[in-house]
Image (cartoon, rainbow, N blue to C red):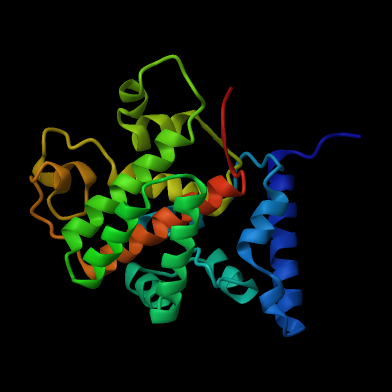
Amino acid sequence: MTEMNIEQRIDEFMHELCQKAQEAIDNGKTYDFNVGDFIAKYSNRKISDIKSEPIDKWTEYGWVPILPSFKGNDILSTLIPPDNSEKADDFMMKKLNKHEIDTMFNELHKYANLYNHNDNTLSEAISAFNNQLYSGCSLLLFAMIDACFITFQPTSSKSRRALAERAAKDKIENIDSYRLSCANITLCIIKEIFKNADDFATVNDNKLNRNFLSHGMNKYMPTYKDCLKVFVLLYSTYVLFDTNVFKWKK
C-alpha cells in the first residue's frame, strides 16, 4: 500500500481533531476531550508539516493557544486564528481568569517538581507577577524556560556551560518536532523572544526580548499581559515535552 503523503497525513490529523472535538461539543462532553490527551495520543505520528497560517498568526500574536482548561470547543476556536492581535488578546485574556491562572500556576509547580527544576525560581516569578514586578517576573520565567531546554537535552561529554549556551535558540534546531501546531508556535515564540540582541539594535526596542532585558538594555518594559504570555509559554513547553511531542535527535 502506498504510504500517505505529508499533506494527506496533515489532513487526516486535522480532520480527526475537529471531528473528535465536535463530537464532544455535540454530546455536551467537552470535558472528555482535552488538548493534552489528544496530543499525547498522536505524539508518535510523524507529521512533517501542517497548514502554516495558525502557526504564523499565533506566533505573531505571541500566544501559544493552550491552557490547562482547554477542551474541544477551545481547540476548535484556535484552529482558525483571530484576525488580529487585539482579538487574540481578547480571546486568551478572557480564558485567563483568576481560577485559570491559579490552575496554571499549580500545574507549573507540578512540572517543576516532576523534572527537579528550581521551584523556588517559579515561586518568585509568581510572587513578582502578583506584586506587579513584571521585569523580574519575566527574567525568572526566562530562566525556567532555559532550564527546560538545558535539562531535557541528552547527556553529553561537553561541559554544562557549553550545552547551556543559547539553549532556547540554538538547541531548538536539534529538536525533531512532529510539527503539531502548539509545538511549532511554542518554538517560534521562544526563538523570537530569545533572539540575538544584534548588539542591542534599536529595532528591538519596542518588544520583549530576553537579552535586552537580562543585560539592562531594554527600553520596552514588560507588562501584565507579557508575563501571562510567558507563563503560558513555559506551560506549553512543559506540556509538549511531557507528551513527547518534542524529540531530541540522536
Q: Position of residue 186 (x, y in %)?
A: 44, 50
> How far from the left and from the top, in percent, is residue 31?
67, 77
Inspect this view and state whether residue 163 appears: yes
Q: Can you name the residue that lies furthest to the bottom here?
A: 28
Residue 235: image quadrant is: bottom left
Residue at (45% x, 75% y) in the render: 100
Q: Position of residue 78 (x, y in %)?
A: 53, 67
Q: Where is residue 110 in the image (x, y as percent from the top left)?
A: 49, 58
Would you say 21 lies left or right of 172 here? right
Front position in the image: 169 or 147: 147
Query: Would you identify the image quadrant in which residue 1 lies?
Result: top right
Taking 160 as reference, is 99 left or right?
A: right
Query: In the image shown, does 42 or 56 lie closer to the viewer?
Result: 42
**Observer-nearest of 166 and 160:** 160
Residue 17 sits in quarter: bottom right
Q: Which residue is drawn at 26% across and 59% down?
A: 124
Q: Which of 173 and 142 is in front in this view?
A: 142
Q: Is residue 137 above or below residue 34?
A: above
Q: Quadrant of the C terminus?
A: top right
Res. 61 visible in picture: no
State the residue lying farthest toward the right.
Answer: 1
Tell me if 230 is positioned left or right of 235 in this view: left
In this rendering, the count of numbered labels is: 0
Residue 69 vs 211, above or below: the answer is below
From this view, report whether residue 114 is shown above or below residue 102.
Answer: above
Name the residue at 44% across, 51% down.
112
